[in-house]
Amino acid sequence: MFANAYELIVFTLNYIGIYEPVNNTFKTLGIEYVLRIIIVLVEIAILFVFALLTIMFLTWMERKVVAMVQARYGPMVTGPRGLLQPVMDGVKLIGKEDIIPAKADRWVFTLAPFLVFIPALLIFIPLPFGESLIISDLSVGLLYLIAISAVSPIAILLAGWASNNKYSLMGAMRAVAQDISYTIPLAISAIAIVLFTGSLSTVEIVTAQNGTWFGFIPKWFIFLQPLGFVLFLIASIAEMGRIPFDFQESEQELVAGFFTEYSGMKFAMFFLAEYAHLFSVSAIVVTLFLGGWSFPYISLLPAALVPLVSLGVFLVKTYAVIFFAMWLRDTVPRVRIDQLLSLGWKIMIPLALLNLLVTGFLLTVGVFQ
Amino acid sequence: MTWITKNWTMVGIIQGLIVTMKHILRIGNRPTVTVQYPYQKMKVSPRFRGLHAVDEDACIGCGICEVNCPNGTIQIVKYKTRWYPQVNIGMCMFCGLCVDVCPMNAMKMTGNYETADYTRESLVYGPDRLLFKKEVKQ
């Protein structure tokens, strides 16, 4: 099939019969690269719109799930079942005054929300949304994902420092401590997957999970790496900063943590980034452990349907993980900061190393082929 | 280390997850407790002390309610040739003493709690807004 979405778009344009004449016009002008740039820009626009719609849907879904757990209705008034609530929130946030505290560091204060938001969108680039639905199949995809998600603590620290407020600074410090201590088990349990696939490319990780054992058990890495899956899931929920580990916010202790001083659209940027993170981290969990877009017998479908069906499978799995994160958020209270750090350093890192050791040993002996 | 040897199965978390999942799937008797307030209203209890109401025929304008009001909320004013109480609910604490002392049982408190307004002046409820006529049962 096609390597990425670019080739898919080119193929579709060819199929309609537009690509050749347009390409020839550009060729005669001597600017073929412009067409490439246009197609890439279209891809980026589609991704951006998709990301924003997903984020808006997630804000609605979060409230609905919390409301269901707490025997409430949740948003009901705007639109059917309150579906237009995110739009109204956006209108409200745009209308708010944009306050910068008098003694804040103006430039850093303004820069920080963008620095949080842009990496959250950059994570979407190597995510395989479906068969040949990927912006760019990087050969270092997994490394890229972990590296980009490590940018957000810097931005959070900038936000907390520039606010010139002790609660913000404490929230930022806690967030950075948490992110650093949980990136390590996250990366180590991802390395165990890399040992299986021998590649960092997200597409190859997904294709390695194609097929079944005994005809019905899908070859997902969750069955080979149950401990790695649990560690990765806990670490990624901690990376997202969601409720069992939401030390960056902790409304009851730190007012709201690092974004106490933010208002209006800057505040919205932090929240959009948080939900973009929720989606992308769940997508990474799905890609690494739950088979990505692959599904048993998906290859039996007609080839034209495969990108669409695989996109559907991927979204269903991702939303299942997101639902789990929300469900966990509504169930578990926040842990203490010392419990968090001791869980990360004393329990999860040794367990992740043990998992890596056992995986490496079994692979060397030749138990898995 | 004792923590993990004791809790590695995460029984507590799983039990909690089961409880919340029962809520999500509505297993058992779990009615939604909130109401869509401006459109739906909850029933207030019969002795709830809301806005005042004065029986137009029973009230004799004696002023005992005015005397007894701890906050000095009530004033007797003239309205359509007779004297009736006027209540400033901006100062009222809804203690209900005016209802208790009324010799003619003309004063009562309704369940109306939606009394928010934009100005302080409009919180003064004159007889035109307080009076009601008791419907005589046949």
Image (cartoon, grey):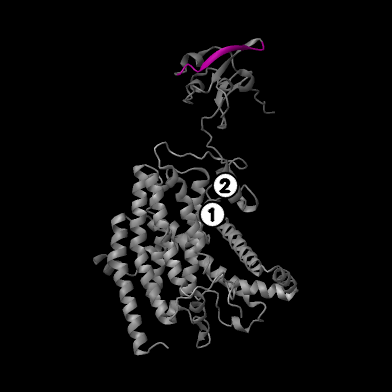
The answer to whether B124 is drawn above or below residue A79 in the figure is above
| Label 2 Cα neighbours within 10 Å, binned few <14 / some 14-19 / many ≥20 | some
Q: Main secondary structure of the magenta part?
A: strand
Q: Which residue is mark 2?
A: A89
Pinpoint residue A265: horizontal percent, then vertical percent.
53, 46
Tell me the subunit letter for badge 2.
A
Q: CA distance from mark 1 to mark 2?
A: 10 Å
| Label 1 Cα neighbours within 10 Å, binned few <14 / some 14-19 / many ≥20 | some
Identify the residue at image location x=43%, y=70%.
A143
Residue toward you, A264 or A82: A264
In this image, B55 relative to B2: left or right?
right
Q: Is residue A212 visible?
A: yes
Q: Specify the quadrant that holds the C terminus of chain A.
A: bottom left
Pinpoint residue A141: horizontal percent, then vertical percent.
47, 72
Tell me the subunit letter for badge 1.
A
Identify the residue at image location x=53%, y=23%.
B89
In this image, B128 relative to A335: left or right?
right
Pinpoint residue A27: horizontal percent, then vertical percent.
70, 71
Which residue type does callout 1 highlight?
Thr
Q: Which residue is mark 1?
A: A59
Residue B76 in the magenta stretch? The answer is: yes
Residue toward you, B31 or A118: A118
Identify the residue at image location x=48%, y=39%.
A99
The answer to whether A363 is drawn above or below residue B15 in the figure is below
User: Pointers 1 and 2 in contact (CB under 8 A)?
Assistant: yes
The answer to whether A48 is drawn above or below residue A5 in the figure is above
Mark 1 residue element: helix
Q: Which residues are magenta?
A: B71-80
In this image, B64 relative to A346: left or right?
right
Q: Specify the quadrant that holds the N terminus of chain A.
A: bottom right
